Amino acid sequence: MRSIWKGAISFGLVTIPVKLYSATEQKDVTFHQVHREDGGRIRYKRVCTLDGEEVPYPDIAKGYELASGEIVVLTDEDFEGLPLSTSRRIDVLQFAPADQIDPIYFAKSYYLEPDAQGAKPYVLLRNALESSGQVAVVKVALRQRESLATLRVRDGVFVLETMLWPDEIRKPDFAFLDEDIEVRSQELKMAESLITTMESDFDPSEYHDAYREALQQVIEAKVAGKEVIPPREEEEARPAVDLMAALRASVEAAKREREAGEPAKAKKAAGKSKDEEKAPAKRKARKSA
C-alpha cells in the first residue's frame, strides 16, 4: 500500500505522527470508451461553451452557478482565507460509544500507520481506546474537505472513518410512512420465525461478486475467441398475494437451505482442525532437526 497523506493524531498534549492509507478498494471491471470501428480510445477536450476554444488547464477556475444561471468565478486567492485546517492534524474532539453513531454517517475508511517515533504513543492510545469499548470522534481535513470522523481499532490498527455532516443525510419522505398499514400478529410471528431460521454468524468470505466474476469470464472468452452465451434471464419475482403463505414457504426454504449448508460448514471446520493438528507436528519436526 502507498500512503496518501501524512499528519498527526492530536490527543490532548500528545501528538502521534501517522501515515494514512486507503483501507478499501473497489474491484469493478473498468472500461474505456472506444471507437466501435477500430477500438481507438475516445479523448475529450476542455472547450469553452462561449467561444468554442480549447482551454488549457492553468486557465481553468472554479465556478459556482447561481439560481439565475449566472456564474461566480472563484480564484485560488478566494480559497486562501477559508478556515480549512492545513495543519494536517487529526484532532480528537471526544470519545463516545460506537453504537451511538448511526452507520449511515460513515463515508470512507482509512488505515493509520505510526511513524517510527510515534509507535509508542500510538500503541498506548490504541490499547486505551480498545479497552474502553468506545470510539474517538475527530475532525480532519482531507483533499480540501473538512470532515468529522471516528477512530476505532481493527486488527491492531487505527481505522479512520470519515463521516458525512448531519445536513448531508437525507430524510426519508415516503407516502407509505403516513399510511395506517395493519400487520396481523400471526404474520409478525411468522416473519420473526423466518429471521430466527436464517440467523447465523456473519462470515464475509462466504459471499462473492457473481456479476464481476461472470463479466470477467465474458472478457476472457472474448480474448480466447470463444462464443459467448448469455445467461438465461430469471423470472422477475412478483409481490406475494398471500403474505402468510409466502412467509411460511420462505421459512421452510430457509430451513432446507440451512440444513444443506451445515454439512459443508462442518466439513470446512473439520479441515481447519486437521490443519491445526498437523501444525504442532511440523514445528516439532523442525525443532528435532
Image (spheres, helix red, strand yellow):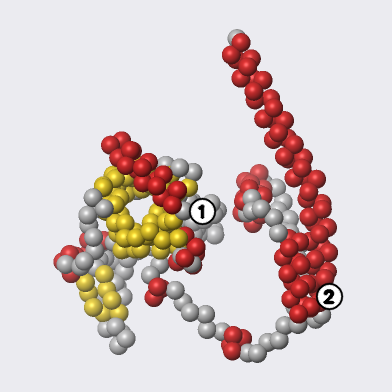
Residue at the top extreme, as displayed: 289
Identify the amino acid type marked 2: Ala
Mark 1 secondary-structure assignment: loop
Depth check, front residue: 119 or 53: 119
User: Do tag 2 and tag 1 residues touch (Cβ < 8 Å)?
Assistant: no
* 26 versus 180 height, above or below: above
Task: Write the residue at 76% across / 67% down.
Answer: 193
Q: Using the rendered view, name the quadrant where residue 65 is placed.
A: bottom left
Q: Relative to 210, is 241 above or below?
A: below
Pick the front one: 180 or 224: 180
Rendered residue at 82%/53% (across/down): 259
Instruction: Point out the frontmost of discs 2 and 1.
Output: 2
* Location of residue 146 with respect to 116 vertically, above or below: below
Q: Secondary structure at mark 2?
A: helix
Number of marks in picture: 2
Rendering coords of residue 83 (x, y %): 21, 66
Residue plotted at (47% across, 60% down)? 98
In the picture, residue 66 is in which quadrant? bottom left
| Image location of residue 255, percent across then percent down | 81, 59
Q: Residues within 10 Å of mark 1 (few under 14, many from 20)?
A: few
Image coordinates for residue 274, horizontal then vertical, percent: 72, 30
Q: Position of residue 31 (x, y in %)?
A: 52, 56
- Numbered badge on residue 245: 2
Q: Earlier in the sequence, mark 2 or mark 1?
A: 1
Task: Please say whether residue 115 is visible from this viewpoint.
Answer: no
Q: Nearer the viewer, residue 36 or 173?
A: 173
Residue indicated by mark 1:
26
Mark 1 belongs to which amino acid?
Answer: Gln
